[in-house]
Image (spheres, rainbow, N blue to C red):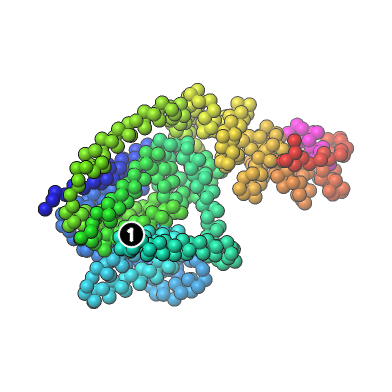
C-alpha cells in the first residue's frame, strides 16, 4: 500500500484551535468582572479539548456510527423535550399557526425550563443532517425506521423554533452540498442546469421579498430583524475597535459594555452580538478571531481535499451529514451567536461535529490509499516553509507600514480596559481610591495613544468623553469632533459629541447632530431624563440646555406649553434671564394666557419679545 501523506492543513487547523482556546483564557484579564466570563471561557476550552479527544478516539476505534448514534439520540430526546414544553415558552414572534400546532403537541406538564428558540434551532441544524445520514447508512429497516421517526420529530421541533437564521443556514448548507455532489457526479451540462436552477430560485426568492414586503408576517419580521441586527453589528464592530488586542472578555460582559460605550446609556439593552464572528472578535480580540476563522478555512480545505481525492472508497454518509450540519450552523452564525450564549452545550456540539467530519474524512483518505507526487508544488514539505516565510514578510511589512496606528490602538485598548474597570455602573462597590487609579491609568494610556497618533479616533473619543464627564468641555469637545470626523456613522461618536454640545449650550448644533441617530425618539426621551437629572443636581442651566435641545429636535412642535415655560424657569434659575424671556414669549405666542409664562415674565420684570425664527439644520 502506498504511504499516506496527509496535507499539513490539519496541522494548521489544530494549531489554530489551540490559539483560539488560549485567547479565550487570556480574555479573562480583559473582562471588567472575570466571574462573568468564566463559564464561556470554560466552554471554549472544553470544546477544543472535546474536539481533540473525540478525534483521537474515533481514529483509533473507528466507531463513527456509535458516536453519531449517541449524539443523535441525545438530539432526538432534546427535540421531544422541546416539543413537550413548547406551549409554556410563550414565544412572542412565533406565528399563530405554529403556536396553535405546537400547543396541541405540548403534552407534558410545565417543567418551568426556558429554552431559547434560536438555541434549540442551533442544536437541530447541527444534528438533523447526522440523523438523516444515519437513516441512509442503516440497512436494517427496523433501525432505519427508528432514525426516520427521530428525524421527523427533530424536523418538527426545528420548524417550531421559527428561527429564520437557522432556516437560512440549512438551506444554504443543502445548496452547498448539492453543488459539491454535482461536481463529483454530474456532467458539465447537468451542472449548468443545476446552477441555473439555484440562481433562478434565489432571484425569485429575492423578488418575493420585495413584492410581499411587510404584508406577510414572516417577511415583515425578517426585514425588521435584519435592520436591528445591522445596527448592532455596526456598533459592535466599532466597539471592538477600542479593544482589538484583548477583547472585552467573554460571557455576560457584552451587555453593559455595549450599552455604556456604544449606546452611551446606563442600562443593558442587548445581551449579545447576534453574530458568531463578532462574538469571537469582541470577546477574544483580533487574534482569537483570526484563529477561529483559520479553523473554519482549514476545516473546509480539508473537506475539499477529501471530496477531490477520494474516488474509489467514498466518504461515509456521516462525513456529509456532519459537514452539512457544521455549514448550517456557521451560516446561522452570521445572524446569531447562540454558541456564545448557551455555550455549555451549543459550542461543544459544533466542535464535536467538526471532529466527526474530520475523523471520517481521514478514514476515507486512508481507504483511498493515495500517494502524493513529489512534483506537487503545494506538498507538505514546501507548504509550511512557504507559509511561514509569507507570514513573516507580511508581519514585517505590516509593522513598518502601520506601526503608529498599531501602537496607538494598543495603548487605547489598555486605556479602555482600565476605564471599564473604573466604571461605577459596572462595578458599583469599587473603592474610590481604586477607581481613581484606574481612571488615571486610562487617561495615561489614551494620552500615550494620542502622542503617537494625534488623530487616532478611538483614543480621541474615549478620552474626549472622559473630559466631558469631568466638566472639561474645552478640552473634550475638540477631541470628540476629531473622533466624529473619522467615525460619522458610529452612534457613540455622534451621541458623545452631541451631548457635549448640549452641556456647553450649543443646542442648535446638538439637536442637528443628535437628529442623525437611528432612533430619535429614544434620544428625546434620554434628553428629558438628563434634564431631570441635572435639575436634581441643582444644575438648572444644563437642564435648560437639555430641554431646549429636545424642543429643537422636535421642530418646536410641542403642544404642552408647560414644557416651554419650564425651559424658561430653568434658564431663569440658571442665571440666563434673556433666554428665559425668549421661551416664556415663545409659549405665550402659542397660548397668550399661559399662566406659567406670564408669571415667569413678571418674576423677571420683563415683557414679551418677538420670538426668533427657528433655524433648520440645513441652514447656515
Residue identifier under label 1: 183
Residue 595, image x and y in percent?
Answer: 83, 47
Where 81 falls versus 495 (above or below)? below
Q: Which residues are magenta?
A: 570-585
* 478 relative position to 601: left or right: left
Q: Residue at x 82, y 39 (%)?
A: 612
Q: Is residue 580 magenta?
A: yes
Decide if residue 609 is in sight here.
yes
What secondary structure do most residues of the magenta stretch adopt? helix
State the count of labels: 1
Residue 614, image x and y in percent?
Answer: 78, 41
Q: Is residue 301 magenta?
A: no
Decide if residue 177 is in sight here.
no
Residue 347, image x and y in percent?
Answer: 34, 53
Considering every residue shown, the one lying at the far left of the view is 1
Residue 150, image x and y in percent?
Answer: 31, 71
Number of residues whose C-alpha sits closer than 10 Å to that of mark 1, classed few (under 14), some (14–19) or many (20 or more): some
Image quadrant in which the C terminus is located? top right
Q: Residue at x 33, y 34 (%)?
A: 391
Where 45 falls versus 467 (above or below)? below
Amino acid at each position: 500500500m502506498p504511504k499516506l501523506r496527509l496535507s499539513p492543513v490539519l496541522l494548521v487547523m489544530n494549531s489554530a484551535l489551540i490559539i483560539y482556546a488560549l485567547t479565550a483564557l487570556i480574555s479573562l484579564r480583559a473582562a471588567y468582572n472575570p466571574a462573568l466570563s468564566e463559564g464561556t471561557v470554560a466552554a471554549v476550552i472544553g470544546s477544543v479539548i472535546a474536539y481533540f479527544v473525540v478525534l483521537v478516539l474515533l481514529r483509533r476505534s473507528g466507531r463513527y456510527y456509535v458516536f453519531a448514534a449517541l449524539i443523535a439520540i441525545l438530539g432526538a430526546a432534546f427535540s421531544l423535550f422541546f416539543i413537550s414544553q413548547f406551549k409554556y415558552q410563550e414565544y412572542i414572534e412565533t406565528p399563530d399557526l405554529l403556536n396553535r400546532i405546537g400547543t396541541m403537541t405540548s403534552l407534558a406538564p410545565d417543567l418551568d425550563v426556558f429554552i431559547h428558540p434560536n438555541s434549540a434551532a442551533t442544536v437541530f441544524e447541527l444534528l438533523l443532517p447526522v440523523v438523516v445520514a444515519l437513516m441512509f447508512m442503516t440497512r436494517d429497516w427496523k433501525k432505519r425506521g427508528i432514525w426516520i421517526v427521530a428525524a421527523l420529530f427533530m424536523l418538527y421541533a426545528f420548524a417550531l423554533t421559527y428561527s429564520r437564521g437557522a432556516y437560512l443556514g440549512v438551506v444554504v448548507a443543502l445548496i452547498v452540498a448539492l453543488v459539491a455532489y454535482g461536481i463529483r457526479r454530474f456532467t458539465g451540462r447537468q451542472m449548468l442546469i443545476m446552477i441555473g436552477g439555484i440562481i433562478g430560485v434565489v432571484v425569485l426568492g429575492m423578488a418575493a421579498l420585495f413584492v410581499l414586503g411587510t404584508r406577510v408576517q414572516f417577511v415583515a419580521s425578517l426585514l425588521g430583524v435584519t435592520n436591528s441586527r445591522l445596527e448592532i453589528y455596526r456598533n459592535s464592530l466599532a466597539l471592538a475597535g477600542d479593544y482589538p488586542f484583548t477583547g472585552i472578555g467573554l460571557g455576560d460582559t457584552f451587555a453593559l459594555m455595549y450599552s455604556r460605550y456604544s449606546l452611551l446609556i446606563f442600562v443593558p439593552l442587548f445581551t449579545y452580538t447576534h453574530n458568531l464572528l463578532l462574538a469571537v472578535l469582541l470577546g477574544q480580540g483580533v487574534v482569537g478571531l483570526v484563529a477561529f476563522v483559520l479553523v473554519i478555512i482549514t476545516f473546509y480545505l480539508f473537506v475539499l481535499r477529501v471530496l477531490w481525492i477520494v474516488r474509489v472508497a467514498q466518504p461515509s454518509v456521516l462525513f456529509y451529514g456532519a459537514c452539512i450540519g457544521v455549514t448550517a450552523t456557521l451560516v446561522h452564525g452570521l445572524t446569531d451567536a447562540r454558541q456564545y450564549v448557551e455555550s455549555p452545550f451549543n459550542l461543544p456540539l459544533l466542535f464535536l461535529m467538526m471532529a466527526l467530519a474530520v475523523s471520517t474524512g481521514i478514514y476515507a483518505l486512508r481507504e483511498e490509499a493515495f500517494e502524493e507526487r513529489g512534483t506537487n508544488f503545494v506538498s507538505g514539505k514546501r507548504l509550511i516553509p512557504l507559509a511561514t516565510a509569507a507570514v513573516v514578510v507580511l508581519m514585517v511589512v505590516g509593522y513598518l507600514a502601520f506601526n503608529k496606528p498599531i501602537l496607538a490602538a494598543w495603548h487605547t485598548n489598555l486605556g479602555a480596559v482600565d476605564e471599564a474597570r473604573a466604571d461605577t455602573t459596572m462595578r458599583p462597590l469599587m473603592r474610590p481610591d481604586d477607581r481613581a487609579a484606574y481612571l488615571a491609568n486610562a487617561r495615561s494610556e489614551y494620552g500615550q495613544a494620542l502622542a503617537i497618533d494625534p488623530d487616532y479616533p478611538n483614543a480621541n473619543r474615549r478620552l474626549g468623553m472622559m473630559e466631558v464627564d469631568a466638566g472639561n468641555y474645552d478640552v473634550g469637545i475638540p477631541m470628540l469632533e476629531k473622533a466624529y470626523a473619522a467615525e460619522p456613522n458610529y452612534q457613540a461618536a455622534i451621541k458623545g459629541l452631541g451631548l457635549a454640545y448640549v452641556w456647553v449650550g450649543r443646542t442648535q448644533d446638538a439637536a442637528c447632530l443628535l437628529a442623525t441617530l437611528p432612533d430619535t425618539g429614544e434620544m428625546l426621551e434620554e434628553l428629558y431624563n438628563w434634564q431631570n437629572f441635572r435639575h436634581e443636581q441643582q444644575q438648572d442651566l444644563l437642564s435648560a440646555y437639555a430641554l431646549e435641545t429636545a424642543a429643537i429636535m422636535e421642530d418646536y412642535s410641542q403642544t404642552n406649553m408647560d414644557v416651554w415655560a419650564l425651559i424658561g424657569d430653568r434658564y431663569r434659575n440658571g442665571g440666563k434671564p434673556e433666554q428665559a424671556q425668549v421661551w416664556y414669549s415663545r409659549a405665550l405666542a402659542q397660548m397668550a394666557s399661559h399662566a406659567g409664562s406670564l408669571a415667569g415674565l413678571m418674576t423677571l420684570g420683563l415683557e414679551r419679545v418677538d420670538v426668533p425664527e427657528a433655524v433648520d439644520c440645513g441652514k447656515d
